[in-house]
Amino acid sequence: MPFRLSMPRKPPTGSEFDTVIIGAGPAGMSAALYAARLGLKSIIIGEEIGGALTEAGEVDDYPGLIGVQGPDLAKKFEQHIRKYRVPIVRDKVVRVEKGSSFKVTLMGGETYVSKTVIVAVGSRRRKLGVPGENEFSGKGVTYCAPCDAPLFKGKVTAVVGGGNAALQAALLMTVYSPKVYLIHRRDEFRAFPVYIKKVRSDPRIELVLNAEVRRIGGSKSVEWVDVLRKDIGEEFRLSVEGVIIEIGSEPPKDFLKSMGLRLDEKGYVVVGPGQETNIDGVFAAGDCTAGPHKKKFDQVVTAVAEGAVAALSAYEYVTLGKGLPAEELQY
């Protein structure tokens, strides 16, 4: 018979855990996997199972999985967690209170008690903040090229941004769009050389540099964008039917602040080598973190690694006392 994964029931309110993992993306699911293997009673709480992977296209930089689609990789992660019968609750954590232990409150009203908390809430897409952006969201304005690229087949589009994600989006859009404008506020890109070389050599991509989008407009859907050339002070209009905004992400700063976590100037959780935060018993991993001990490199492989380290640190905290170095563990 084929192996079937049963879904653990949602734990009743008031249930106690060794660790509550907030976030169900790669970092959170990796933390759950390692916590389970270390014998910790754990639970994952997340609004979207798979996190940013659910919006990703082809993932071709995760070792051993060649050209896997983001949602498919998320399912593989989830299946692995189900094997260890870790409950996965789709809900939003609205409050974390620290006493002798942590009380975690969900939007649905349930509360859970835990000895430790692992924060893996990821980050969210930034907006341009220009007129027409919100009005045409879902009507030509999108923040996820892999999700919506097929909707623009045969249509002229514009990609806004200058980092890796923006250049990747522009290259993807050429599969569907006969012409792609790549709008960037600087005259140089902040992306990997391989992507820069590709966009500069692709005849379907027209670079619009030193430029900012001032407004997005149309009737029932996007028909144009107004762009300001900052170097010459001139504004002009581009006729497009889609605008893909790729200007980076930001963590849920308000929630992180409400927990009392130490954040850097951009709102990311400052962590130490063991993913520890300024609050005893709270660890953080993945795209929501930063700090002097880590290079900011938001990739699936780094999120997974940080989730594993956070789980090990939680294990040390629960079973051996905080601060015990990993080399003293007996395997």
Image (cartoon, grey):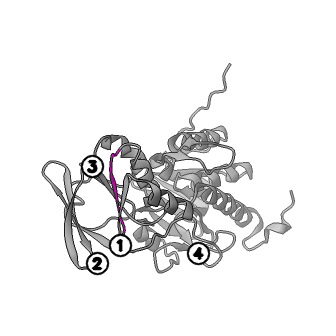
What residue would you read off at disc 4?
279
Decide: few, some or many residues near mark 1? Use Cα within 10 Å; few <14, some 14-19, many ≥20. some
Location of residue 24 in the rendering, given as x and y in whole percent from the top left corner:
53, 51
What residue would you read off at disc 3?
138
**Sequence-first disc among 4 and 2:** 2
Decide: few, some or many residues near mark 2? Use Cα within 10 Å; few <14, some 14-19, many ≥20. some
The answer to whether residue 216 is above or below residue 73 is: below
User: Element type at marker 1?
Assistant: loop
What residue would you read off at disc 2?
230
Left/right of residue 142 with respect to residue 68 in the rendered view:
left
Work out how far the residue at label 2 is from the one at label 1, CA to CA, in angstroms: 8 Å
What residue would you read off at disc 1?
185
* Residue 302 appearing in the image: yes
Question: Which quadrant is the N terminus positioned in?
Answer: top right
> Magenta region: which residues?
177-184
Residue type at numbered disc 3: Gly
Work out how far the residue at label 4 is from the one at label 2, CA to CA, in angstroms: 44 Å
Query: Is 219 within the magenta?
Result: no
The answer to whether residue 132 is above or below residue 149 is: below
Residue type at numbered disc 2: Lys
The answer to whether residue 243 is above or below residue 6 is: below
